[in-house]
Amino acid sequence: MATPFFGKGTAIFVLTFITLTINANDGIISRLGLEFGYGLIALVSLSVSTLLIGQRTVVISMVIAMSLLANMPKEFVLNFGLDRDLYMGIATAIILAPVVSRAMH
């Protein structure tokens, strides 16, 4: 039973790590004012994968897509009509909504 969770968690970790390092010099980590480092990216990816491991595939894919859009170059994302920071806010809301819901019940 632990093997599917380990595989799913590893896949989420790798995908999150890749999306956060795509545009490293102008990504969300840099825009938050933090210095880019692979250790910090690994820590963020690990925490995101921990929170998403029990979620459905559609939720995971939405978070990965929003993270990818939040870290793309500004000119590319403006074609969709929204700011890059909004995409990261949507991804954060998707991640935290089930956690808050479980805490309230």
Image (cartoon, grey):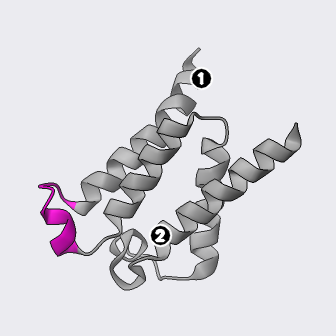
Q: Which mark is residue 102?
A: 1
Closer to the camera in the image, 98 or 13: 13
| Local SS, label 1 | helix
Q: In which quarter of the image is residue 73?
A: bottom left
Closer to the camera in the image, 17 or 100: 17
Extent of the magenta region: 74-83
Q: Where is residue 31 in the image (x, y as percent from the top left)?
A: 33, 73
Mark 2 = which residue? 20
| Local SS, label 2 | helix
Name the residue rendered at 27%, 59% in the picture: 85
Q: Where is residue 77 in the image (x, y as percent from the top left)?
A: 21, 64
Q: Position of residue 20 (x, y in %)?
A: 47, 69
Name the residue rendered at 59%, 23% in the picture: 102
Q: Is residue 44 visible?
A: no
Note whether 21 is above or below 3 in the view shown. Answer: below
* Image depth: mark 2 or mark 1 in front: 2
